[in-house]
């Protein structure tokens, strides 16, 4: 009986964390790749692991609302199978974000996230990308500028309700 319960749990866990990108997520990915191409930059391969992290995070943002007080959109709640953290504008807890791909998946490297959203609205691919393009720090991540001048080798995209996040990685993903 215990084996059956464990198999059922593992099957349920796999279903939750092995989602294919939604149409909106695919569109956001395509818009980002088009924008990068306009800047003379190469396409970034879509990562299953980073997409799982992105999809998990947007659902946490919407359902558990970890954005409170000084905690911004890179924060994670204490209501899931991950370590929680309050990410503040001074980047004091950056490691918490950077290590989420290793914590949640088999991805070997760090992840770097850009986020967009609000409670009560509906995020769109166009709205998210336009918001990031207007923000120099976020735009720099997308187009490998400034401190982000290394080549991205993996990208993951998540959209849910009012939130969109994109995770970038320097290591390839199988």
Image (cartoon, rainbow, N blue to C red):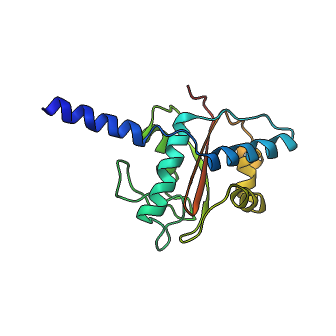
Residue 6 seen in the current view: yes
Taking the view exactly as shown, the residue that stands out farthest to the top is 174
In the picture provided, is 145 more to the left or to the right than 81? right
Q: Name the quadrant containing residue 38.
A: top right
In the picture provided, is 150 more to the left or to the right than 91? right
Residue 98 seen in the current view: no
Quadrant showing the N terminus: top left
Up/down of 44 relative to 38, above or below = above
Quadrant showing the C terminus: top right
Total labels: the figure holds: 0
In the picture provided, is 51 more to the left or to the right than 86? right
Q: What residue appears at the point 76 percent right and 41 percent down from the top-left corner?
A: 33
Q: What residue appears at the point 76 percent right and 60 percent down from the top-left corner?
A: 130
In the picture provided, is 123 more to the left or to the right than 13? right
- Name the residue nearer the viewer: 153 or 174: 174
Taking the view exactly as shown, the residue that stands out farthest to the left is 1
Indicate the position of residue 116 as horizontal and vertical percent values.
Answer: 62, 61
- Name the residue nearer the viewer: 73 or 59: 59
Indicate the position of residue 89 as horizontal and vertical percent values.
Answer: 57, 65
Q: What residue appears at the point 33 percent right and 34 percent down from the top-left corner?
A: 11
- Name the residue nearer the viewer: 46 or 78: 46
Taking the view exactly as shown, the residue that stands out farthest to the bottom is 69
Up/down of 66 relative to 14, above or below = below
Indicate the position of residue 148 as horizontal and vertical percent values.
Answer: 71, 45
Indicate the position of residue 163 as horizontal and vertical percent values.
Answer: 57, 60
Q: What residue appears at the point 63 percent right and 46 percent down from the top-left corner?
A: 23
Q: Name the quadrant containing residue 9.
A: top left
């Amino acid at each position: 009986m215990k084996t059956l319960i464990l198999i059922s749990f593992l099957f349920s866990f796999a279903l939750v964390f092995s989602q294919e990108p939604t149409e909106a997520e695919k569109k956001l990915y395509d818009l980002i790749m088009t924008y990068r191409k306009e800047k003379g930059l190469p396409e970034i391969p879509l990562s299953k692991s980073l997409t799982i992290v992105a999809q998990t995070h947007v659902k946490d943002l919407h359902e558990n609302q970890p954005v409170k007080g000084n905690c911004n959109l890179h924060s994670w709640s204490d209501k899931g199978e991950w370590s929680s953290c309050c990410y503040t504008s001074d980047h004091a807890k950056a490691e918490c974000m950077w290590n989420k791909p290793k914590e949640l998946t088999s991805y070997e490297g760090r992840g770097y996230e850009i986020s967009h959203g609000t409670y009560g609205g509906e995020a769109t691919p166009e709205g998210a990308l336009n918001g990031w393009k207007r923000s120099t720090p976020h735009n720099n991540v997308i187009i490998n500028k400034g401190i982000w001048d290394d080549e991205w080798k993996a990208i993951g995209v998540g959209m849910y309700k009012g939130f969109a996040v994109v995770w970038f990685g320097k290591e390839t993903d199988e």
